[in-house]
Amino acid sequence: MGSNRTGWLMLAPTLLILGVFGIVPFFYVLYLSFHQWNPFAANPNMIFIGANNFRRLVFDGEFLTSLWFTLKFAFFAVVSEIIIGYMLAQMLTRDFYGKGFFRTIHTLPLIVAPIVVGSVWRLMTTPSIGIIPYYLNKWFGYQLNIGSDATAAFIITVIMDIWHWTPLVTLTLLAAIVSLPKDPFEQAQIDGANRWQIFWHITLPMIRPAILATVFIRLMDALRTVDEVWMLTGGGPGAATRFVGLHIWKIVFPKTDYGYGSAISIIVLYLTLVMCWLLYVGLVAPRVRRSKVNADA
């Protein structure tokens, strides 16, 4: 009994911080989503409008477009980061010249603030002074201008996110790989399994929890990205990189429509939870059921 009380006392500061900065703001935003509120209007009072904000966003073309671009961005960025991060993690399990230096350089983007990352990439992609447009024009004759080319702007935002967050994936998967037992791999090699069979039947199932946790983290971050893209493209050209986070920002701050912005935030949170739940059901639940069947047998 005393140990349980001590445990709750140790958790109390964390629970307090979570309640103050997480739960309370969530319920406040949920409350705002059922109101029409512009504190800078002639009538600054909240007006209860029920579910009208949620009904409005279903027919909001700008919101649906930003949601579609956000889902595309999250898919390409997260999938690329998982693949590249796994390849780099496997490379770092081997010894090669300059391994320590490469690991240090590789992890440097993680300590750079997102707004700085966006600023640096904006400088690198500016047609007149950027190093990327210069060499693309010199080597391939391609004129890169993310201010007028919507496809190029979207691709550059994905590449920027990959550059910034792949080191996190690499470190996570590297920790999972180096902790794997050697016996299953040695036995598979003795039985004549090739590299693909070893990866598919041994490595992947054993590091699946680490991959799933990494996907959850990166998916949630990708769906709410704002500062990097804001500094790089400002959401343009047009709406090519106006992701949901930027759309909410423009609704809440320039337009000061706090109620509608809160409704969009709630829907985005709900969609994020649904996607994470679907990933869990698709990747973890079948494995749990197979384990129970094998145990019963």
Image (tube, grey):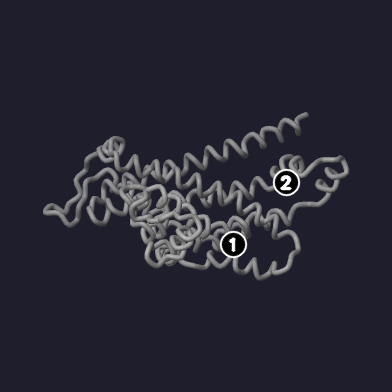
Amino acid tagged 2: Thr
Q: Nearer the viewer, residue 39 or 279?
A: 279
Left or right placement of residue 104 versus residue 67 in this view: right
Q: Position of residue 31 (x, y in %)?
A: 30, 47
Tell which tag, 2 or 1, sits nearer the viewer: 2
Q: Which residue is mark 1?
A: 6
Q: Which residue is mark 2?
A: 203
Residue 149 in the image: above or below residue 197: below
Residue 1 in view of the camera: no
Left or right placement of residue 199 versus residue 74 in this view: right
Q: Position of residue 194 (x, y in %)?
A: 79, 42
Query: Where, by quadrant of the figure, is residue 91 drawn?
Result: bottom right
**SS of the residue under disc 1:** helix
The CA distance from mark 2 to mark 1 is 40 Å
**SS of the residue under disc 2:** helix
Amino acid tagged 1: Thr
The residue that appears at 58% across and 65% down in the rendered structure is: 107
The earlier-in-sequence mark between 2 and 1 is 1
The residue that appears at 82% across and 40% down in the rendered structure is: 193
Q: Nearer the viewer, residue 292 or 97?
A: 97
Q: Are marks 2 and 1 in contact (CB under 8 Å)?
A: no
Q: Position of residue 60 (x, y in %)?
A: 28, 39
As drawn, the label of residue 93 is none
Residue 255 in view of the camera: yes
Query: Where, by quadrant of the figure, is residue 157 drawn?
Result: bottom left
Residue 142 in the image: above or below residue 283: below
Q: Determine crowd level at label 1: few under 14, some 14-19, many 20+ residues with C-alpha closer than 10 A.
A: few
Could you tell me which quadrant the C terminus lies in? top right
Residue 86 in the image: above or below residue 130: above
Q: Nearer the viewer, residue 65 or 218?
A: 65
The residue that appears at 38% across and 56% down in the rendered structure is: 145
